[in-house]
Amino acid sequence: MSCGKDHETDCSEVLDRLAFFVDHELADADTAQIQRHLDECRPCLDMLLFEQRMKLQLARSGAEPCPDSLRQRVRVSIREVHLEFRQQP
């Protein structure tokens, strides 16, 4: 995915590491690089906000275990959203 603008870091690279960014699992230099990108790229910022909302909703949900079949369907759905977002012009 690319927003059509020239960035230091490509949108697809940012999106690949977005979950790690949200979870504060990146090195400081990588975090700064992604933050610079997000400061200038609205589509990627929107995806960050989506990831943050998703994480918050998951944290609020009960600790009830879910069936493996549901877990797999959710993973597939999330992957499809990521792929659709990447394919946007």
Image (cartoon, helix red, strand yellow):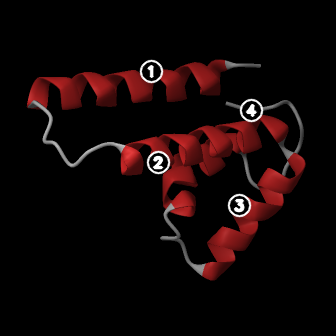
Instruction: Say whether residue 84 is left or right of residue 65.
Output: right
Mark closer to the observer (2, 1): 2
Where residue 2 is drawn, which disc sits there? 4
Residue 60, percent from left and from top: 39, 47
Which residue is denoted by mark 1 in the rendering?
80
Q: Earlier in the sequence, mark 4 or mark 1?
A: 4
Residue 32, percent from left and from top: 73, 72
Which residue is denoted by mark 3 in the rendering?
34
Q: Earlier in the sequence, mark 2 or mark 4?
A: 4
Residue 68 in view, yes or no: yes
Residue 33, percent from left and from top: 73, 66
Q: CA distance from mark 3 to mark 1?
A: 23 Å
Residue 8 in view, yes or no: no
Residue closest to the eye, 81 or 33 = 81
Q: Are marks 3 and 1 in contact (CB under 8 Å)?
A: no
Residue closest to the eye, 23 or 13 = 23
Q: Is residue 68 above or below residue 84?
A: below
Which residue is denoted by mark 2 in the rendering?
55
Residue at 52% from the left image edge and 29% from the top image edge: 82
